[in-house]
Image (spheres, rainbow, N blue to C red):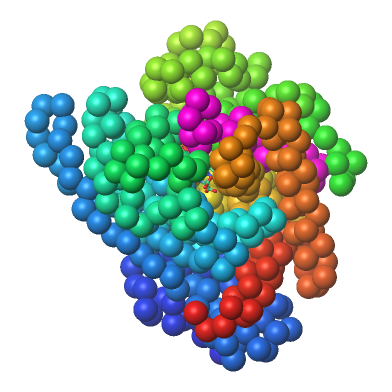
Amino acid sequence: MDYVERVLSELKAKNPNEPEFHQAATEILNGLRPVVEKHPEYEKAALLERFVEPERVVMFRVPWVDDAGSVHVNKGYRVQFNSAIGPYKGGLRFHPSVNLSIIKFLGLEQILKNSLTGLPIGGGKGGSDFDPKGKSDNEIMRFCQSFMTELCRHIGQDTDVPAGDIGVGGREVGYLFGQYKRIRNEHVGVLTGRGLTYGGSLVRTEATGYGLVYITAEALKARGDSFEGKTVVVSGSGNVAIYAAEKAQSLGAKVVAMYDSNGYVYDKEGIKLDVIKQIKEIERARIKEYASRVKGAEYHEGCKGIWTIPCDIALPCATQNEIDGASARILVKNGVKYVAEGANMPTDLEGIEVFQKAGVVFLPAKAANAGGVATSALEMAQSSGRLFWTFEEVDAKLKNIMVNIYHNMDAAAKEYGCEGDYVAGANIAGFIKVATAMMAQGVV
Ligand code: NDP
Ligand code: 2IT
């Protein structure tokens, strides 16, 4: 058993019933094998064992009262995974599926993603099994206030800076920030994704989706190609999906399908994003509505069918494990050439293998969706400096970061003998900086 296998088997034994955490750790550590072989000192320092163990896990009760006066209790989490290169940084997810395994997988990924941005941010993640769907604004506000009443003891602008993720957007960040400020009496950059009137950064709303398209455009450019005239399928219809679709369209691609958790819409003329934005961002309604508003569009119940639509580029932007081996095989059969992950871990391990064996250019989440957290770090910089940059300035920095990530992971893959394997390349490029910092800081 080599070092990587030993750490993985110990991790599974010590953390049973955490399948998503096992999956993320397997993908990451397998990619790091050439690095730990080159650096035997890492094993002596138990570096991988420390890397996969969160520095701190906070779990708490979140009681709240609904509009009818009934009392509810949800679970709250914050996993402060790794602070070697900067304060913990990562989103909060509010979704009924949230559990410790999911928050730990997201936190582990976040360490390497944040390192890849080149900015000084460590890795963390949090959330709750609270379901925001169907709740009134007042219920959302009371929940966020209760959640922050506990969380505020554990975070701070130089300690841990949360942001949004699934189910946490501008509205939730606003309520969370309001409660933090009220309890701590500090107006600081303790959350990112804030509104533009109270410390937020231009481009943060668009950043993950735009960044996803910028890095994919760089991969296309390296192969003498572009988004122009390409058929694109985008899964999800939330923050990441909408702005990925918007940027892909602006570069001349045709986005033909999107979904929410009930089903997908197919519009062979190209999805009309103003209609999607109206339904999803303003009305918070179901995507099914699209087919009743746009002539010629089709709605299909269920999500999986979206991957049977032929496309050149697939951008999974909803959630983990939305593309399994079977869906990957259909995409390949239908001629997909590029898959770039907007969501975190949307492709399962079998799906990744199918894409890589078929020669599909596969851009893994920790590189491809790093634009969101990178722009969060730019928001932190603006908050600390008490200044604001223009849209063009932030967008240019974001683009530059995504182009650099592409070339860094490409170079790392080449250097470690796995050219074109961006899963390994991204893991290696992200890990080296974290490992170097951890080694320098001693056994902590
Ligand atoms: P949103 O809440 O804005 O949107 C999520 C979208 O995914 C919705 O369309 C939602 O459908 C769909 N979805 C969620 N869960 C499921 C599910 N189990 N099955 C099918 N569809 C589902 O979240 P974001 O756009 O912010 O996040 C999407 C992904 O991107 C996540 O994986 C997140 O971790 C990742 N990400 C987000 C970043 C950000 O800056 N926001 C940064 C980097 C990554 P429905 O409305 O029906 O629930
Ligand atoms: O998965 C992610 O990178 C995010 N949800 C964004 C995190 C952040 O701190 O902006």
The image quadrant of residue 435 is bottom right
In the shown orientation, is residue 41 left or right of residue 183? right
Q: Compared with residue 201, is residue 43 higher up or lower down, i.e. above or below?
A: below
Q: Compared with residue 228, is residue 118 higher up or lower down, i.e. above or below?
A: below
Q: Which residues are magenta?
A: 193-220
Query: Is residue 210 covered in magenta?
Result: yes
Main SS category, magenta section = helix
User: Residue at point 31% right, 38% down?
Assistant: 182
Q: Nearer the viewer, residue 261 or 138?
A: 138
Query: Is residue 32 covered in magenta?
Result: no
Q: Position of residue 51 (x, y in %)?
A: 53, 74
User: Residue at point 77% right, 65% down?
Assistant: 413
Q: Nearer the viewer, residue 421 or 332?
A: 421
Q: Answer yes or no: is residue 261 visible.
A: no
Q: Position of residue 48 (x, y in %)?
A: 55, 79
Q: Answer yes or no: is residue 223 visible.
A: yes
Location of the N terminus (image quadrant): bottom right
Q: Compared with residue 437, is residue 320 higher up or lower down, i.e. above or below?
A: above
Q: Position of residue 208 (x, y in %)?
A: 60, 39
User: Residue at point 47% right, 65% down?
Assistant: 81
Q: Residue furthest right?
A: 224
In the shown orientation, is residue 70 left or right of residue 144? left
Q: Position of residue 30 (x, y in %)?
A: 61, 73
Q: Nearer the viewer, residue 156 or 254?
A: 156
The image quadrant of residue 183 is top left
User: Residue at point 38% right, 21% down?
Assistant: 285
